[in-house]
Amino acid sequence: MAIIRKLLKTTAYGTLGAAAGWVLWTRNSKFVPVSTDNPILESAAYKRNNPNRNSGLHDLCVRKVPLSKIRLELLDAEEKGQPKLVEAFCAGVWTGIGEFDTSQLGGSRKRGDGRNCARSSGS
């Protein structure tokens, strides 16, 4: 009986901790719905991957960043047509909490040259 009680307490504390972490992580973010006439939903890639126009759950997470927190060289590069601001944003997402080991999920492994390959490839 003590094991079950300990398991329930651990589960409750873990759930509470995860919920509190989510609230703290997204406290400066705002989730807004995407309208059905959004250009993303009309793109060729979206239509190719969703030919039956199935409905889905769509929302955007918006976070305002003060201009004082954006490096000036990124803004200057954007004015010249270079996507440095977008690249810095993506680098921040995929090198932080957004990155995880996809080889465990996708069943792939690394080759000697650093690229991923499927397990069934035999190399």
Image (cartoon, rainbow, N blue to C red):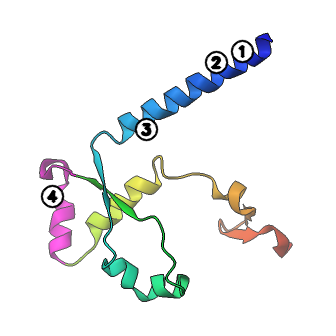
Nearest to N terminus: mark 1 or mark 3? 1
Residue 78 circle label: none
Q: Is residue 5 above or below residue 15?
A: above
Cα–Cα gap, marks 1 and 3: 26 Å
| Residue depicted at x 26% and y 64% | 85
Quadrant for the N terminus in the image:
top right
Q: Is residue 116 above or below residue 70?
A: below
Label 2: which residue?
A: 9
The three-letter code of the residue at mark 4 reads Leu
Label 3: which residue?
A: 22
Cα–Cα gap, marks 3 and 4: 31 Å
Q: Which circle, 3 or 2, is nearer the viewer?
A: 2
Cα–Cα gap, marks 4 and 1: 55 Å
- Binning the other alpha carbons within 10 Å of mark 4 as few (below 14), some (14 to 19) or many (20 upward) gives few
Label 4: which residue?
A: 72
- Binning the other alpha carbons within 10 Å of mark 1 as few (below 14), some (14 to 19) or many (20 upward) gives few
In terms of secondary structure, where does tag 1 sit? helix
Cα–Cα gap, marks 4 and 2: 49 Å
Our reading of the magenta stretch's main secondary structure is helix
Label 1: which residue?
A: 5
Q: Is residue 45 above or below residue 78?
A: below
**Residue 91 found in image quarter:** bottom left
Query: Left or right: where does residue 17 sit relative to residue 106?
Result: left
The three-letter code of the residue at mark 3 reads Trp
Number of labels in the image equals: 4
| Residue depicted at x 17% and y 64% | 75
What is the span of residues highlighted in magenta in the rendered image? 64-80
**Residue 117 place in picture, x, y as percent:** 73, 70
Nearest to N terminus: mark 4 or mark 2? 2
**Residue 40 place in picture, x, y as percent:** 36, 78
